[in-house]
Amino acid sequence: MSSPSIVSFLLVFCLFGFLGCAGPEEGIYIGKIGNKKEVTIRIKTDGLVELEGYWKQPLQGGHDQGSLRGKDMDALVFEGPESKKFKLRFLYEKDEDSLIIRAIHSRTYGPGARYISTEEESALNPAPRLSRLSPGKN
């Protein structure tokens, strides 16, 4: 391969790698998780993610990476309110216009703090699905 071909290949490879790490599409995702009847996740263009209906008050966060049973997964991580500092992590997989929630973990702040399951089962079964509203319904 010639030098320009190698450079082009590397640029395309890096571009696909970067795009593969992006979070879910911008929009509003709604569904049921456990006994929470209406959970809403809003993905904004600036990378900010808002969660309503899972905790007593809305939480804000962003995209991250996590793992479940040794498998790397995409995650949405939310910060608890100032009065009760914690992190809430939703491990998910994308499926067309849905987010399939594979696990939900939380952790407090401090040395040695680790994520623990917040649902009865650390891996949700059946996995909840949050469906994306059509753009006209935002």
Image: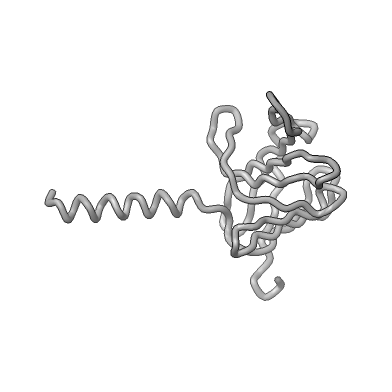
Image quadrant for the C terminus?
bottom right
Q: Give the quarter of the image for residue 43.
A: bottom right
Residue 50 percent location from the top left of the image:
72, 56
Q: Position of residue 100 (x, y in %)?
A: 65, 47
Report the coloring of the rendering. Answer: one colour
Comparing 86 with 12, the one in front is 86
Please state if 104 lies on the left or on the right of 55 as rendered: left
Q: Is residue 43 above or below residue 110?
A: below
Q: Is residue 125 visible?
A: no
Q: Is residue 134 visible?
A: yes
Question: For residue 68, what is the image quadrant?
Answer: top right
Residue at 69 percent of width and 41 percent of height: 89
Whether residue 133 is situated above or below residue 103 in the rendered picture: below
Q: Is residue 16 left or right of residue 66?
A: left
Tell how many labels.
Answer: 0
User: Residue at 59% of width from left, 28% of height from top?
Assistant: 69
| Nearest the eye: 44 or 127 | 44
Q: Is residue 44 left or right of residue 2?
A: right
Q: Is residue 3 left or right of residue 86?
A: left
Q: Residue furthest left?
A: 2
Report x, y in % for residue 97. Answer: 60, 59
- Work out which residue is located at the far top of the displayed protein and give it: 112
Q: Residue at the location (71% across, 38% down)?
A: 104
Q: Position of residue 114 (x, y in %)?
A: 69, 28
Residue shown at the point (70%, 60%) measured from the top left: 42
